[in-house]
Image: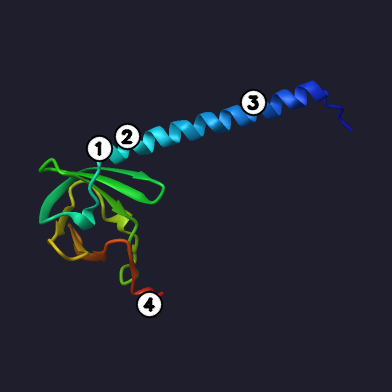
Amino acid sequence: MIKINKTLFIIGIIFVIIMSIFFTIMDKKHINNLNKEYSICLADAKNENAIIIEKRDWHGTYFIKLLNGNKYWVPDSRNYDYEEYDIEDYLVNGNTIVKKRGIDSLWIITPKGKFVFIISRNINKNKR
């Protein structure tokens, strides 16, 4: 059996705690910066019809920048009618987002076709 010096063990525990606090603080700063830059949820957008030029993701939330300069955050959504059912697979640079005011439906136009999602919802799950 390996003997561990009690002092070394305590120093190790303290180190792990300090590193956990550090990474938690850095994580909160990062998400606060994203929330400032992408302050509007796509569900709250008025009318939008523009090409995606940038996408970031953070723990199931996607942050997109459009060619017209607008920036939004998009919660995870799925449509099980499609083989690739997660919205993340369609939020790709070059694809077009179409969102109309007052409805929570979102269309993404890709070279493969037009795909519909309902923001923050999983639809057609019974088809899986």
Spatial CA span between label 4 and label 1: 37 Å
The percent position of residue 23, horizontal first and vertical second, equals 50, 32
Point 41% across, 74% down: residue: 128
Amino acid type, mark 2 = Asn
Identified by mark 3, the residue type is: Phe
Tell me the mark number nearer the camera, choosing from 4 and 1.
1
Label 1 Cα crowd, 10 Å radius (few <14 / some 14-19 / many 20+): few
Give the crowd class for mark 4: few <14, some 14-19, many >=20 residues within 10 Å: few
- Along the polypeptide, which appears first: circle 2 or circle 3? 3
**2 and 1 marks in contact (CB < 8 Å):** yes
Task: Tell me the residue that label 3 is attached to.
Answer: 15
Decide which of tag 3 and tag 1 comes sooner along the chain.
Answer: 3
Q: Nearer the viewer, residue 100 or 85?
A: 100
| 3D distance between C-alphas at marks 3 and 1 | 33 Å
According to the image, label 1 marks what residue? 37
Q: Give the residue at mark 2.
A: 33
Q: Secondary structure at mark 1?
A: helix
